[in-house]
Amino acid sequence: MTTGSTPVHRSALERLQRTVYFATGLAAALFAALLSSGPNGFVAQLDQLVVPFGAFTVLVGNAIPVSLTVLAWVLPIRALRILVTGSAAGFVASQLLWVPMMTADTLADGAAPWLQGFGAIYATLLAVAWGKPIVWVFPIVQGPLVAAVEYLSAGGNLEQSLLDGMGALVTNLILMGAGAGAVNAAARQDQEAEHARAVAAHEAALRTAEREQARINALVHDDIMSVLLAAVRTPDSPAVAEQAQQALASVATIRETRTRASAYAPGEVVAVLRTTANEVGEDIVVTSDVTTLEHVPAQVVAALAEATREALRNSVIHAGGPEVRRELAVTITEGEVHVTVRDDGRGFNPRTVPPRRLGLAVSIHGRMNALSGGGARVVSSPGAGANVELWWRAEDVQ
């Protein structure tokens, strides 16, 4: 059985853009195969055009769109946008130069230029690449441009040229609208996810402040108040001086902690994560391995706790009933914290989790990836349980 692991996190908009680029490339390949032969095909029409221009039309009309089946997953989004925009401009230039670059007055057999049918592909690509109102210029100009080029190159059949121009206009407008709608929906999803991350971060900060205040209150109560009571009862006892030194050490600890933006001792980190597990379920087995005395920043502890909570909550909801064994393993070494949440439940395929489900994307991956030095990985497959790994490495912090 193959075990799936969660892919690199991308925004919803980027995932949409790459998917549409890939799908459009496949459509362009199929379209090119259908239009390669016959009087309306590019093979028959290449020798009716000036040679360099004919090769250019194949490049912008066929080769570049088809190459997106590979480039969609290789190039950065910005490079893809530049490629799409430049080739779309080349496509329009090919339409404008078609008639001057013909070697005869009209195409053989009254055929229409083969390039005309590929405008819909660029309408889709431009809508997804930019998602801005300016790109609507492209489908609007395609109607009259297709009609004019066909009328001048195919023998002057005005009625057929107007019908084809109208068809191109309608097709381009529909595909442009569909692409723009998909881009807007993906952008809204990204905005909602960002808002959810901001809310989660705010809530985590509040919980961290509450935990920090509780820790300070405990230090004051256990050390300082004990010294004051002992001083009242036995002012001359040598033990009072020793307790006073301990109290001063506690105060220094508080001052140091507040100065360096709060940090947790390794034992406190384990305690926080153990409490988090107990809040989700009392049957969760918690183990720890600590080999350092180095403190962990409070924001790191907050992120680990919240991501751990979400992983355990998902396990309780989706992995199965009481028969499922759930474990939380915490490992703290010098400059590194590693947390593993595992269960032997029904499992799932992380690649099939819908993007609208924000649990994995926001509460686990988003929270940990937003942390300097943090990261997360989810490994699972149907019937094989789930394994969620969270980590933070101090050496990654700049």
Image (cartoon, grey):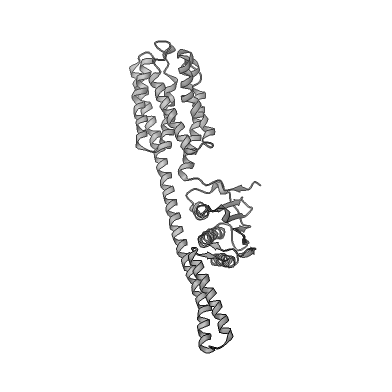
Q: In the image, what residue occupies the spot 35% across and 33% down?
A: 136
Q: How many marks?
A: 0
Above or below, 355 relative to 32: below
Answer yes or no: is residue 337 visible: no
Residue 347, how many percent across, how many down? 60, 53
Judge from the rendering whether residue 45 lies leftward or rightward of residue 376; answer left or right.
left
Answer yes or no: is residue 201 visible: yes
For the view shown, which residue lies furthest in the top direction?
Answer: 104
Judge from the rendering whether residue 170 lies leftward or rightward of residue 84; answer left or right.
left
For the view shown, which residue lies furthest in the right direction?
Answer: 1
In terms of depth relative to the viewer, which is nearer, 129 or 140?
129
Q: In the image, what residue occupies the spot 49% across and 69% down?
A: 255
In terms of depth relative to the viewer, which is nearer, 16 or 338?
338
Residue 324, how many percent across, how many down? 62, 61
Residue 69, how many percent across, how many down? 53, 33
Residue 126, how many percent across, how many down? 41, 33
Q: In the image, what residue occupies the spot 52% across and 86% down?
A: 231
Above or below, 246 relative to 37: below
